[in-house]
Amino acid sequence: MSLESIVDRFLGVWGRPGSDALRQLAALCHSDVAYQNPVVALTGVEALAEHVGELASLIGSRRLSRTTGLQLAGSWCGYGWALLPQVRGAELAGHTAIELADDLITRIVSFHGAPPPRTFLLSSSP
């Protein structure tokens, strides 16, 4: 399976009920996949499927869609995403990095919203 297919199938899982998410995640992820975002850290396909299922009612008929190309760094792949309503504009956006081994996702780190702007401090020292 291509890397783009893995990422797009992973995004398609979000918003699915727990049992449907579990079946799909089991095909995409290592059994002890690690997932982390700013408020949740969990391990295992079952825990990830439960988390995805809990979000299903919040996501509703909207869908997560990849908004960028893929960035590769060793075994890691990064991409941007957005939660798109049926009609217009993104309600929530973020970026995610996944690590793969043997075509299975082993680690996921996800951030919601755009990164904060970089700030520069002026200093008189070189």
Image: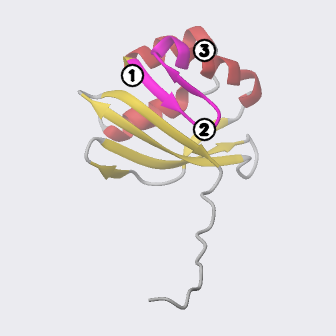
Percent across and percent down for residue 38 are 61, 39
Left or right of 37, for residue 101 = left
Tag 1 secondary structure: strand
Percent across and percent down for residue 88 are 75, 50
The amino acid sitting under disc 3 is Glu
Please report the residue visible at 30 percent of the width from the left and 36 percent of the height from the top: 2
Vertical placement of residue 118 versus 9, above or below: below
Mark 3 and mark 1: span between their CA atoms?
14 Å
Vertical placement of residue 49 versus 60, above or below: above
The amino acid sitting under disc 2 is Leu
Q: Which residue is mark 1?
A: 29
Mark 2 and mark 3: span between their CA atoms?
17 Å
Image quarter of the N terminus: top left
The magenta stretch is 32-48
Please report the residue visible at 74 percent of the width from the left and 47 percent of the height from the top: 91
Left or right of 86, for residue 82 = left
**Relative depth, front residue between 47 and 126:** 126
Q: Quadrant of residue 6?
A: top left
Q: Which residue is mark 2?
A: 64
Q: Residues within 10 Å of mark 3 (few under 14, many from 20)?
A: some
Q: Residues within 10 Å of mark 2 (few under 14, many from 20)?
A: many
Q: Which residue is mark 3?
A: 50
Image quarter of the C terminus: bottom left
Please report the residue visible at 31 percent of the width from the left and 33 percent of the height from the top: 100
Task: Pick whichever of labels 1 and 2 is earlier in the sequence.
Answer: 1
